[in-house]
Image (cartoon, helix red, strand yellow):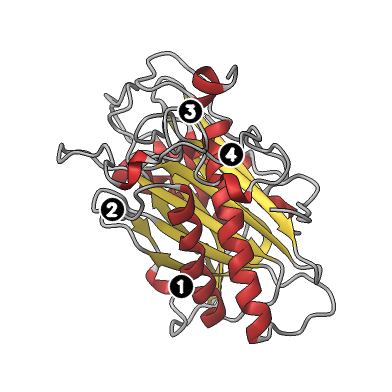
Amino acid sequence: MTNIMTGPKNLITDVKGLCVGNSADENLKSGSTVLMAGKPFFASVDVRGGAPGTRETDLLAPDKLVDTIDAIVLSGGSAFGLDASSGVMDALHRAGRGFEVGDIKVPLVSGAIVFDLLNGGNKNWLSNPYSELGEQAYHAADSDFALGTHGAGTGATTANLKGGLGSASVVMPNGVTVGALVVVNARGSVITSDAGNFWAAPFEVGVEFGGYGCDDRPVTHLTDTGLSDESGANTTIAIVATDAPLTSSQLKRLATVSHDGIARAIVPAHTLFDGDLVFAVSTGDIQNMASVAPAEEASLGHAAALCLSRAIARGVFEAQATETDLLPCWQDQFAQR
């Protein structure tokens, strides 16, 4: 991927106005991540996996009343983790944020979860911890945030390595910024073989995930996925964002085509055991652009998909080893190659 310029942070927060907060419980081996802005933003979602877990996603359809929402929460904890959105909602309510209904404001928070209940952490809680984790993530929100074993990526895993929280950005030739944020907890693999090369290698910018390039050996994953019928669940959940002024229907298309980024970086993707989904967000903050023409929309979707592929590889590349890990992290396996 040549002649590509990332934003200054190479994070989704390169899209002006966005901030991200992480929280985690190391004993629990899980956490939450929230994406917010100083004002409500436009959003949509596209679900492809066979085992999704979501909150307030129906309201993002183009035919629904509400145009904007206040936050998107990504969390570990499977269905328990949906409560992280409640913590964010409570914090937004105290801050006076929300959709006005008479003299009441109702914060609108969409969310999605990954399954990380069997990752070696202590899940024997007395009360659901995720509401508190959501509120902690809200208060930690900033333009800078950590990748890898942080936030909702704290306990993430893939077929053969630790997963993690990833992000990336790109600035298009017309000045539009695109960013991606992802929790990589995939049933499939992000590497092509035991050599440690990433499926996303063709799209790497610089050495953002090691600079190892493409694998020149035969790729066995095409005939042997390494998956079994044993019980379990995973999921890759992501957000792509832009400052381009997209309509609700254009955001829906952006979320849809961005799934190509998952399919290019994880093999296999969108399985029955994954709840893969992508949110798409527009802040509309770019100057001198009143609308996005079809040709520009196509380029934007392509950029978002490639940005998501890079974010997936970065999430695994940045993962760090911790106690009770059931899988190795990429750095320990391949960094000294």
- From the image, tell me which residue sits under label 4: 314
Q: Position of residue 297 (x, y in %)?
A: 63, 78
Q: Please, what secondary structure does the residue beneath circle 2 have?
A: loop
Which marked residue is nearer to the observer: mark 4 or mark 1?
4
Q: Residue at x 32, y 57 (%)?
A: 49
**Circle 3 — which element?**
loop
Mark linked to residue 271:
2
The residue identified by callout 1 is: 60
Q: Quadrant for residue 246, please give it.
A: bottom right
Neighbor class of circle 2 (other Cα within 10 Å; few <14, some 14-19, many 20+) is some
Q: Nearer the viewer, residue 317 or 193?
A: 193
Measure the C-alpha gap from mark 1 to mark 3.
41 Å
- Cα separation, mark 2 vs mark 4, equals 22 Å
- Nearest to N terminus: mark 2 or mark 1: 1
The disc, 3 or 2, on the residue closer to the chain's N-terminal end is 3
Give the alpha-carbon distance from disc 4 to disc 3, as whole Å. 17 Å
Which residue lies at the image location 68% right of the left edge and 79% below the top edge? 296
Given the image, on which type of amino acid does mark 3 rest? Ala
Give the number of the mark in front: 1 or 3. Answer: 3
Amino acid type, callout 4: Arg
Q: Quadrant of the C terminus?
A: top right
- What mark, if any, has residue 195 been given in the picture? 3
Distance, label 2 to label 1, CA atoms, is 24 Å
Residue 158 can be seen, yes or no: yes
Residue at 47% x, 62% y is: 260
Question: Which sits earlier in the primary sequence, circle 1 or circle 3?
Answer: 1
- Give left or right: position of 201 versus 9: left
Mark 3–mark 2 Cα distance, whole angstroms, equals 24 Å
Marks 2 and 1: which is nearer the front? 2
Q: Position of residue 182 (x, y in %)?
A: 52, 48
Residue type for callout 2: Thr
